[in-house]
Amino acid sequence: MSSTVPRFASPAACFVAVILAVSWHTRTNAAVPRNPRPTEAHVDPPVTKSTGSWNQQAAAAYLDQRAAWWMQWPKAERDHETFCISCHTAVPYALSRPALRKSLAEQTPSVNERRLLENVTKRVRLWKEVAPFYSDADRGIYKTVESRGTESVLNALVLTSNDAHNQLGDDARMALDNMWAEQQTTGSRKGAWLWLRFANEPWEADDSDFYGATLAAIAVGTAPGNYRERSEIQNNLKLLRDYLNRECAAQTTINRVALLWASAKMPGLLEPQLQKAILQEVLSKQQADGGWSLSSLSGNWKRHDGTPQDVQSDGYATGLITLALQNAGISPDNDQVKRGLAWLAANQDKTGGFWLAYSLNKNAENHLSPDTARFMNDAATAYAVLALTEANRH
């Protein structure tokens, strides 16, 4: 069911030192109450009022609408009246939607934020009872263990992000415990997590174990209360650090972008020369218009439908990269970061509130439906929001 992921990056790419000033700071998200209310069937349409050079209300409306659709989509349904937590829609929504709350003068989390948190919390509490997202019986060999590994990381990331401004809650602590229990301790993936493989880049392919490990590092680095200093997880953290440093050279650029983001959340995660090399590599990939293109960061990955990859700048790559660069200590006044942020501000869809991105696996015409064709836009909008709100903080 999976295919081998081609890799362009040479080992030397992760060992080229450049002189860049790197300082650490951590973006945190607002806390959300533990007792979410049921979702609303409809959300308000985008409004025309904009804040600054991009429309934050329209972005929030798009994210809310897409989260509501995902949570009600029959193909996302799982047992115990829960739904799958997707890398393209649900997780980016959980990370980004709180960032808009202050600018929109919202006093409480959105209805769909609460429902998503309720869903994750329920699955964490029922971890030994709830069925995996996918099983060997319905999707093929290894899907049960891959589902457990993937979900354990995503649950921890969502709940630690929710607790970031407060104390680490019992549910987030339980999610982290579940995550560490799924960490691999032997073999070639020692230190990582078994990750879902459906031959879909950038989140469900043969190299996505590495991406998942970066998300685990972000979850740990985001957890409040000096969680990463706990003695009982030091061996786990060593395994994770060793894996990420060991496998860095074999990764595509977009995976190293995720690693750069993780290294900003968890100081000491990367050897300094590796972080500097990633910074140099990422900055060198910027396009003439100020944005970045996901297809140029993903090796020579081919679409399943045989259509050519889109090569223009897109919201997902540009949003994630400008977020990672800022988190890694590069000022939003840096010329290249400023150009990336300007690209984001200029390229929000003025009617729909979203940022456009392109699937690496098939073009829009070959998607299951118009709604599934928006998956990359969901992630693009979330990371664009995170990057732009991070810049606004400065």
Image (cartoon, rainbow, N blue to C red):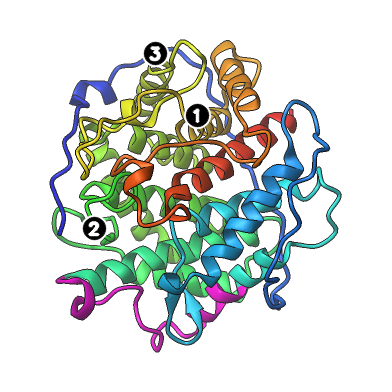
Amino acid marked by disc 2: Arg
* Label 1 Cα neighbours within 10 Å, binned few <14 / some 14-19 / many ≥20: many
The answer to if 127 sits in the magenta stretch is yes
- Which residue is painted at 20% across and 35% down in the image? 250
Q: Name which of mark 3 and mark 2 comes first in the sequence.
A: 3
Q: Secondary structure at mark 3?
A: loop
Query: The magenta stretch spans which residues?
Result: 118-141
Does 110 sit left or right of 171 as displayed? Answer: right
Tell me where residue 260 appears, x and y as whole percent.
Answer: 43, 34
Quick one: quadrant of the N terminus? bottom left
Tell me the mark number nearer the camera, choosing from 3 and 2: 2
- Residue assigned mark 2: 197
Does 282 sit left or right of 99 as displayed? Answer: left
Q: Name which of mark 3 and mark 1 comes first in the sequence.
A: 3
Disc 2 from disc 1: Cα separation: 25 Å
Q: Name which of mark 2 and mark 1 comes first in the sequence.
A: 2
Tell me where residue 302 appears, x and y as whole percent.
Answer: 20, 37
Tell me where residue 118 appears, x and y as whole percent.
Answer: 61, 75
| Quarter residue 87 falls in | bottom left
Tell me the mark number nearer the camera, choosing from 3 and 1: 1
Name the one closer to the observer, 297 or 182.
297
